Amino acid sequence: MKFEHIVFAVDFSERSSGMRSEVESIARRFGSKVTLLHVFELPATWYGSVEAPSAGMSCFQEFYDAAKKSLESFQIDLPKSQVERVLAEGDPAWIIANWAREHPIDLIMMGTRGFGKLQGLLLGSVAAKVIHDTPCPVWTDANARFQGAFQSHIGHILCAVDLDAETPSLLRFSNWVSQLFGAKLQMVHCIPEGETRQNKYFDFDLRRYRSEGSRVELTKLQRAAGVQCEITIADGPVAKAIRNLALENKTGLIVLGRGESQHRFGRLRTHAYQIIHDAPCPVLSYCPALPGHTSSSYSEERPGQSARDVPPPIGSSPP
């Protein structure tokens, strides 16, 4: 089992280019097929312009030709037989999410921020939508453009968990990933500082009480998953606590669950984007709750669901 098919979503930004070495390294390690997927949007003003109907296909062709040229010239150090280039027009997040639903994809890799005035401050809207809606795992790295060549040797993986029914699925997936990389797996559960602050009306250590209770629940969830790994209880601001633990352990990858956010926001899910933004290493977001995805390697039993129709990529036949 391995990541057999990777979709690398490219927008030709600095962050997108910064992800290239990570994609190359993972693809070489597992012999993965890589689909370079670029989605271009026509400007919103074009649709509302009175000149738009008369401009017709000539205007569209200009956007298409420019996007096609950029995609064809995008360099990636992999054998040509291993790389597919796909160009589509529409909403990037919608196209990427539905492409994942319609194809046996194991992993989406993409930059967290592309163009925009708020670079470095917020998680990009496209990345956020893809992380939220896509049924397959999503690999992001907020530091990609600042790092040198990525090394696919990952010795330590940190799995951030809540105390909920999705944790066993997340642990099984994290254990599978740790076996792929031959890495040590450690699970961490964060108790926000406000929940452990000493209360003047109590004469016992509330932090110790919450920590011991959480450890008992985590041990039960471990048994349910059939996975044995080190358990760490952290407190304080969630994203900061996970970042500090990752730095302390020289973590190479953080695995984060995101399925619960599709229905209601669990405690960890409300911090997910901040964790991704602050992480000192790549983050692999996994969604055990979303049905409708067929992976070519890792899969877990879940109810079937028909995917929405996705428009075929420009220049190719429908799947």
Image (tube, grey):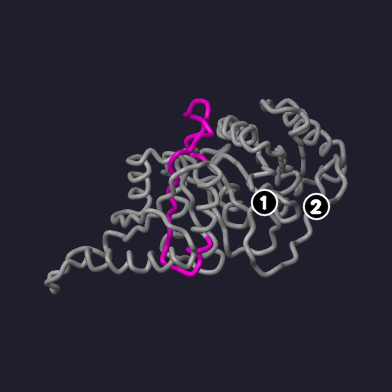
* Amino acid on which disc 1 is placed: Ser
Position of residue 161 measured from the top left corner of the image (x, y, whole percent): 43, 59
Mark 2: give few (<14), some (14-19) or many (20+) Cα within 10 Å.
Answer: some
* Amino acid on which disc 2 is placed: Pro
Q: Could you say which disc has been placed on residue 227 in the image?
A: none
Mark 1: give few (<14), some (14-19) or many (20+) Cα within 10 Å.
Answer: few
The answer to whether 107 is drawn above or below residue 260 in the figure is above
Mark 2 or 1: in front is 1
Give the residue at x 23% y 68%: 209
Give the residue at x 45% y 39%: 155
Asked where in the image residue 267 lies, by quadrant, the reply is bottom left
Q: Which region shows up in magenta?
A: 141-169
Residue that badge 1 annotates: 297
Residue sitting nearer the eye, 292 or 132: 292
Please give left or right for residue 288 compared with residue 94 in the image.
left
Position of residue 271 measured from the top left corner of the image (x, y, whole percent): 42, 56
Residue 74 among magenta residues? no
Query: Upstream in the sequence, badge 2 or badge 1?
Result: 1
The answer to whether 9 is drawn above or below residue 296 in the figure is above
The answer to whether 190 is drawn above or below residue 59 in the figure is below
Check disc 1 and report its element: helix, strand or loop.
loop
Residue that badge 2 annotates: 311
Give the residue at x 60% y 41%: 110
Q: CA distance from mark 2 to mark 1?
A: 25 Å
Q: Which SS type dominates the magenta stretch?
A: loop
The answer to whether 213 is drawn above or below residue 251 in the figure is below
Position of residue 75 measured from the top left corner of the image (x, y, whole percent): 68, 25
Q: Are marks 2 and 1 in contact (CB under 8 Å)?
A: no
Check disc 2 and report its element: helix, strand or loop.
loop
Please give left or right for residue 192 compared with residue 319 in the image.
left
